[in-house]
Image (spheres, grey):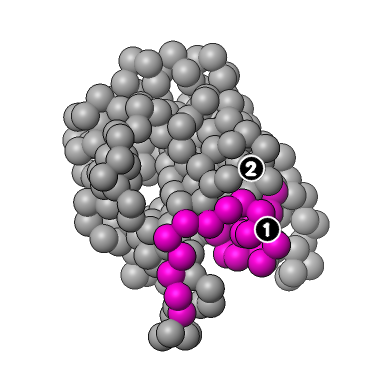
Amino acid sequence: MGNTYKRVLLKLSGEALMGDLAYGIDPAMVDGIAQEISDVMQQGIEMAIVVGGGNLFRGIRGAAAGMDRATADYIGMLATIMNAMTLQEALERIGVPTRMQTAISMQEIAEPYIRRRAIRHLEKNRVVIFGGGSGNPFFTTDTTAALRAAEINAEVLFKATKVDGVYDSDPVTNPNAKLYRSLTYSHVLAEDLKVMDGTAIALCKDNNIPIMVFNLSVSGNIRRAVMGESIGTIVGE
Ligand code: UDP
């Protein structure tokens, strides 16, 4: 059992919002995540969330089908905004104050990304949801999560996934895959372990932001992660 974190950045992939569906958003799944976030917000922690979009659109897949990559990536960024808005709605519905900021301006539905303002919202215990990725094509929401974590001085980046943590091989296809409890950034980069993309890992390494990878489908795990319990895999120096 470790110390409770004060300020965290949670990365939720688009797939996390998809549940068992093949595509899109499962409202029951989003409600479940919102409830867990609501529980940890009672403890007075500051939480920012970066939402992915892979459940709706991935630029790289569009490009593989012949689309211009940058255009496809902008479509992907718009997809993350739909997810972010869905999560915001679910949180507000159960009484959690939130603000959404987007890296692509959409002033009718969200604030633009303004770092100092985001920090102020966190200090007022509002969940800050970052939509639109970094606003740049050729990046990912994992890299956005690392960037925003550095910008808001988050103590830790939580990477919520579908498996228990980082393994030496794919646990879905290899029943003997070994779960790492802790890893160094250098090891992750050298072995190309599937934690987050290399750009995201390098940013966390440069800014000394630990990454905690854990299973989102185990109920209560967001709270355990916030309490500093050693669930999943921790990546650090
Ligand atoms: N994207 C982008 N720039 C960013 C973040 C995201 O171009 O800074 C696009 C990219 O096309 C990506 C899509 O948005 O495929 C969805 O994001 P991502 O794949 O990271 O979502 P996740 O895998 O977390 O669901």
Query: On screen, 150 above or below 215?
Result: above
Q: Which residue is mark 2?
A: 205
Q: Which residue is mark 1?
A: 189
Disc 2 marks a residue whose amino acid type is Lys
Inter-mark Cα distance, 1 to 2: 10 Å
Label 1 secondary element: helix
Using residue 17 as the reference point, say whether residue 222 is left or right of it. Answer: left
Q: Nearer the viewer, residue 140 or 166?
A: 166
**Quick check: is 186 in the magenta stretch?**
yes
Residue visible at 54% across and 46% down in the picture: 236
Q: Which of the image's four quarters has the N terminus?
A: top left
Residue visible at 46% across and 65% down in the picture: 180
Disc 1 marks a residue whose amino acid type is Leu
**Residue 11 in the image, given as x and y percentages of width and height:** 47, 46
Q: Are marks 1 and 2 in contact (CB under 8 Å)?
A: yes
Residue span colored magenta: 177-199
Residue 59 picture quarter: bottom right
**Residue 144 in the image, given as x and y percentages of width and height:** 60, 40
